Amino acid sequence: MRSLEQIEQAAASGDPAATAELGSRLLGGERGRAHQQRGAELITAAAEKGSGEAEALRAMMAGAGVFRLQNWEQALDHLQRAAELGWKQAQAQLALLSADRDLATQASAATPPDASIWARLRRTVDIAAWIKAPPKQSLSDAPRIRKVEHFLPAGVCNWLIMRGRSKLQRARVYAEDGGARIDASRTNSETDFNIVESDLVMLLIRARIANVTGLPPAVMELTKVLHYQVGQQFAPHYDFIDPAAPGFTEELALRGQRIATLLVYLNDDYQGGETDFPQLGLRYKGRKGDALLFANVDTNQQPDPRTLHAGLPPTQGEKWLLSQWLRDRSPAE
Ligand SMILES: O=C(O)CCC(=O)C(=O)O
């Protein structure tokens, strides 16, 4: 990986790819708002010089409302342009989002038919239909646990697995001081996606999650992909933050309580690996694309110990999940 200094030099000489990379590092970095804003400006400049990668980042910035107003239509315009510039990830996203499955199949062929296909595909994306969630069905009313069958299409599940696979790390648990640590109770891997690692498909999944939960994307933590190999597990635990634990006072004050969890089963070709609620005698294993949604607090917004749950170890095959934790408010509130 090039150092920041090397990228700065290449960007200064006008190289659009280096300008995009510098912009992405600054926008995704933690050096403060001024650096992030400069990152956003560099991404826009690189996109205007013809960088497909920057144009795809611009799509994500428009979709998330990063240093500009949130606007799905503009996001799709940028995604189309990124696809026209040959950026493969943008082409694949347009194909995933299109409501015209035949056209999407043609666009996904090794040699797509002609350059106009990206504009035609873009016109078939129906945002309102895409972010609509199928109906919830109750598995338990106290605590509130719902399943949502067919929450995500199979192609989108495959996309999330592909995006997560190359950046998995050993999953961590909360440490007593409010940090995170490796622990024998959680042996699986996970990854999350910060703003520049995210993409338009992931943002639209968050919008769909907002629809099914009634909670806005601003209260969502970073979307995670979890992975379990045979024998790996997440032992019984709670997702709420214990208000009595001294290490978490600051975390609770800053981000609020983790009131809900949404899981999407990204594959189903494994044995075992159910999500287990031992106090309720309830075990759930979704088909590929099904979601499980549960409240971690009771109807008085108090942590609910009945939500104790575990990710049981697969006994054959590997298990992939999307995991989305939701707070009761956004950090800025
Ligand atoms: O792997 C599972 O089924 C459960 C995951 C889980 O417990 C969590 O993300 O909080």
Image (tube, rainbow, N blue to C red):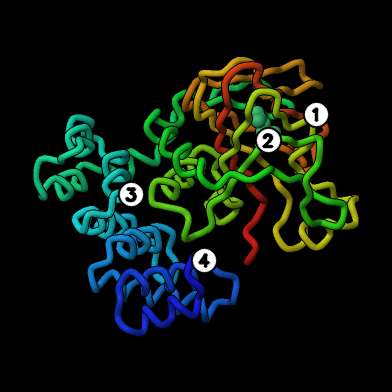
Distance from Cα at disc 1 to Cα at disc 2: 23 Å
Q: Earlier in the sequence, mark 3 or mark 2?
A: 3
Estimate the x, y position of residue 112 in percent, counting from the top left: 15, 41
Q: Quadrant of the C terminus?
A: bottom right
Task: Give me the residue at 44% from left, 59% from top.
Answer: 64
Q: Nearer the viewer, mark 3 or mark 1?
A: 3
Q: Are marks 3 and 4 in contact (CB under 8 Å)?
A: no
Q: Which residue is the site of mark 1?
A: 306
Nearer to me, 78 or 330: 78
Amino acid carrying mark 1 in the image: Arg
Estimate the x, y position of residue 105 in percent, counting from the top left: 21, 32
Give the vertical position of 99 relative to 34 (above or below): above
Distance from Cα at disc 3 to Cα at disc 1: 42 Å
Local crowd size for mark 3, using a 10 Å CA cut-off: few (<14), some (14–19), many (≥20): some
Q: Which residue is the site of mark 4?
A: 28
Q: Earlier in the sequence, mark 3 or mark 4?
A: 4
Q: Which residue is the site of mark 3?
A: 89
Amino acid carrying mark 3 in the image: Gln
Amino acid carrying mark 2 in the image: Asn
Distance from Cα at disc 3 to Cα at disc 4: 19 Å
Using residue 303 as the reference point, say whether residue 108 is left or right of it: left
Estimate the x, y position of residue 246 in percent, counting from the top left: 90, 56
Q: Which mark is residue 188?
A: 2
Q: Are marks 1 and 4 in contact (CB under 8 Å)?
A: no
Task: Give me the residue at 39% from left, 67% from top.
Answer: 69
Local crowd size for mark 1, using a 10 Å CA cut-off: few (<14), some (14–19), many (≥20): some
Instruction: State the SS at label 2.
Output: loop
Q: Earlier in the sequence, mark 3 or mark 1?
A: 3
Residue 275, quarter of the rendered image: top right
Residue 311, quarter of the rendered image: top right
